[in-house]
Image (cartoon, rainbow, N blue to C red):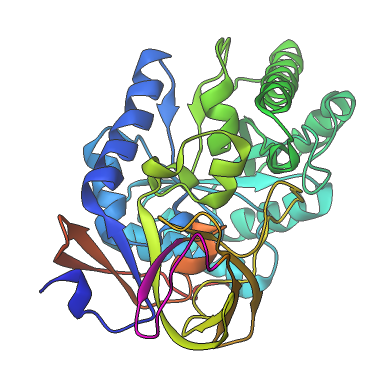
Amino acid sequence: MFIKDLETPNVIVDLKKLKTNIREMADIAKKHNVELWPMIKTHKSDYILNLQLKHGAKGILVAKLSEAEMMANAGAERIMIAYPIVGEKKLERLYNLSNEVKVVCSVDTFESASFLNKKALEKNTIFDCMILIDSGLKRLGISVDQVKEFYNRLKALKGIRIAGVATHGGHVYGASDFDEIKEAACEEVNCVTEAAKIIEQEGGNCEFIALGSTPTVKAINDFKKIKQIRPGNYVFYDAIQVALGVVPIERCALSVLGTVISIPEQGRAVIDVGSKVLSSDTGAHGNNRIEGYGLVKNHKSIVINGLSEELGKIYYNPEEDKLKIGQVLEIVPNHACSVVNMVNKIYGVSKNKVIKEIFVTARGLSQ
């Protein structure tokens, strides 16, 4: 089947670009002698997971416990959970999962650590945990100057083992240029390495010193004592990464296809893809370099400036871009991760042909 035979809206991924992106990040990890634990919420796919494992990923990072369960079934044997696990049912599921694969939890409060400890003692086990460090995002994590006291409080809990530290410098997505990306990367490196140093001075051992978003990992020159990197978006890249200057648009593997269904007047058109596929994300942490809701390939004047659930409203210069009803547009979305979670499958393509259907096996798993 050819790409032109697909009904729109749909999501396609260029298989050659996908594999190139996966190999490149694996090469970065190998070059700097760090382990690659990619965040799989970007793709939520067992097919792409196994490509990453094939190319040397040592484990994976997940956002939610349900993703961890699905990816364990798909072949992942070492899983970090990015956020604290709270709630009796989730703790029971965590215990069950830990009997199947190696699981590393995350904590940033004594209360959440105590919940893990209670469940571990109940089950006669020990949970490995990383302390989350805030390197600038101001979301989860403690500051470096809180590490000593926090670590020593946690040592009293017999059901958990502090296995290291981790951070996510998501504030990088608000960067205005590559210099600010490098600054955010330095903040990540400095925070986790200093936190690890404190823990080791207190008698601990850091098996994990983990960081990484896609932009910062590509900006770090000296990984110092970093042991793990955890980028996610790199498998696809997207319009946000292009706006940040991380990659050119040609490196973006994922696209959304939409058809022009109406041209009410020259310079204004409507496409059959809205927020239920394209997503209304313009950057979770703020970036004023994003214009509209995606980049339309081969049409420089087009701006997707409005989305309803099923439709997109676009403006364009009719002297630069000639549009007609029935024309299919290829759009690089602002945020690939949000788009993939909207669909059951994406189409793997090569040279205008559909090669395979890639199922989003962990789609909608948010618990």
Q: Which residues are magenta?
A: 318-331
Q: Out of 320 and 347, give the one closest to the viewer.
A: 320
Q: Is residue 102 above or below residue 211?
A: below
Q: Out of 236 and 351, give the one closest to the viewer.
A: 351
Rendered residue at 73%/49% (across/down)? 113
Query: Does the magenta segment cover residue 326?
Result: yes
Q: Is residue 152 above or below residue 240?
A: above
Rendered residue at 46%/37% (across/down)? 248
Horizontal and vertical percent for residue 290?
A: 67, 52
Tell me if residue 316 can be seen: yes
Q: How many marks do you count on the picture?
A: 0
- Image quarter in which the C terminus is found: bottom right
Horizontal and vertical percent for residue 30?
A: 34, 19
**Residue 266 placement, left or right of 153:** left
Q: Is residue 8 above or below residue 122?
A: below
**Residue 127 placement, left or right of 157:** left
Query: Does the magenta segment cover residue 264?
Result: no
Q: Out of 120 and 197, give the one closest to the viewer.
A: 197
Q: Is residue 348 above or below residue 147?
A: below
Rendered residue at 56%/19% (across/down)? 226
- Image quarter in which the N terminus is found: bottom left
Q: Out of 267 and 356, give the one closest to the viewer.
A: 267
Tell me if residue 275 can be seen: no
- Snapshot quadrant of residue 331: bottom left
**Residue 345 placement, left or right of 223:** left
Main secondary structure along the magenta-highlighted residues: loop
Horizontal and vertical percent for residue 180?
A: 73, 26
Rendered residue at 57%/12% (across/down)? 225
- Snapshot quadrant of residue 234: top left
